[in-house]
Amino acid sequence: MKEVKSVCILGSGGREHAIGYAFQKLGVDLFFYPGNAGTKKIGKNLQIDNFAELEVFDLVIPGSEEYLAKGISDGRSNVFGPDSRGARLESSKCFAKLFMEKHGIKSARFEIATTHEQLYDALKQFNPPYVVKLDGLAQGKGVIITHSFDEALDKGTKLMNGNMFENVKGPVVVDEYLDGWELSAIAIVNGRDFVLLPFTKDYKRALTNDEGPNTGGMGAYGPVQIDEKLKGKIEELFNKTLVGLEKESIYYRGFLYIGLMIVDGEPYVLEYNVRLGDPETEVIVSMEPEQFALSILKAYGKEPIDEYTPKCCAVDVVVASEGYPESPKKGQEIRFQEGGFFFYGGVNEKNGKLVVSGGRVLHSMGIGGNLQEAREHAYKNINNVYFDGMYYRTDIAGNE
């Protein structure tokens, strides 16, 4: 295995804290940019002025898609992630849908719109509920699902014009609504070789019973057990994707996340992500932290990766701040009691105190021999923390 003594993880959320937690088990020197109050406990948070400074590390792992979209991997052999061309699978919904269509990868029927008039015509080709997705990156919030044609047209137009999220605008994709159940499939990839990580399920809506606006994710659990037939179909989607990338002369190394909708036993691709999911990472890492880190090192060293089956279950309940996802309240002091297992998200340290600095503040983790046990631990864990305006869903892994 390629020797790795220093690892730098890029990002500041719970996902990056979890990746660091896994590599901490291997005894490497850990660094984070910019990190948060949790990563500071297990490594060193850095201020980096120029990404050329990353070349001193044996391994660099981008947590956020933004680094990859901006080309952090271009020309750098120590970065475990695709270059900016490969990152278009996530940074451009239009590119991804056209890529799937070109390479025969099963996905929802779609239309692309760049004007109000085109959006009107596109929506007329679909039945409610309507699904409108922004082409560019919007931190998991650029998706509109509504039964109202007028609302889809109004909000879709605002997405295009940049009136919904600051500095975020461009074309939109109108997708056919698929009625099924969602599954997150993530693989560690090196060229055409890949290994699937344990399957997980996440919860996107802000409120219990799948109510409220879409978020970056309010919780997750794993492993999700599926039959071998479905697993084979999912592996075929990964194969087709990697073959398609090779045909486009794109060498892909890093993580490939496929958000799936399972309809009558058939997997359809909802979206690609070119990095680990959040909160899925927290769940995957919690089940087998050392094996997770070792699998990355093997792929990084271009060695075969062993598939692994987790020996326990994990549940992540996101503790968010009032107002998330639109305008989360910030600056509140976070008070902890002794005990508890948390990955830190929007948490900073100020004058020796922990304060809320983002919408998804903490990931309350539960591990158990079965899903119910893990769920009970995750929710009991929340009793160890308090801040003004905290809220969370009460149904994560509750009906499985």
Image (cartoon, rainbow, N blue to C red):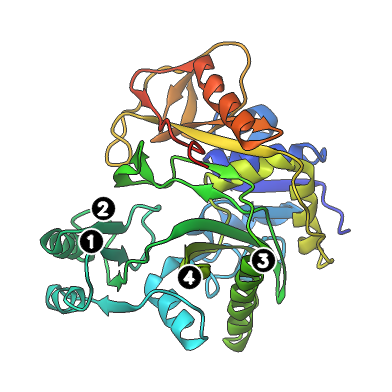
Q: Callout 2, which amino acid?
A: Phe
Spatial separation of the CA atoms under disc 2 and disc 4: 28 Å
- Which secondary structure lies at badge 1? helix
Q: Is residue 363 above or below residue 102?
A: above
Q: Is there CB contact under 8 Å for labels 2 and 4?
A: no
Residue under circle 1?
A: 159
Image coords of residue 108 (percent x, y): 39, 74
Q: Is residue 77 above or below residue 385?
A: below
> Counting other residues with Cα less than 10 Å from the Cα at mark 2, is it few (<14), some (14-19), or many (20 or more)?
some
- Which secondary structure lies at badge 2? loop
Q: Callout 1, which amino acid?
A: Leu
Image coords of residue 382 (percent x, y): 51, 21
Q: Is residue 394 above or below residue 159?
A: above
Tell me which residue sits at (57%, 31%) in the image.
Answer: 375
- Image-quadrant location for residue 390: top left
**Which numbered mark, 4 or 3, is in the foreground of this view?**
4
Residue under circle 3?
A: 76
Image coords of residue 374 (percent x, y): 62, 31
Tell me which residue sits at (61%, 33%) in the image.
Answer: 39
> Counting other residues with Cα less than 10 Å from the Cα at mark 1, is it few (<14), some (14-19), or many (20 or more)?
many
Spatial separation of the CA atoms under disc 3 and disc 1: 34 Å
Spatial separation of the CA atoms under disc 4 and disc 3: 33 Å
**Would residue 51 be seen by someone viewing this image from the given angle?**
yes
Residue under circle 4?
A: 268
In the picture, measured across the screen, residue 197 lies left or right of residue 241, that is right
Query: First in sequence: mark 2 or mark 1?
Result: 1
Badge number at residue 345:
none
Q: Is there CB contact under 8 Å for labels 2 and 1?
A: yes
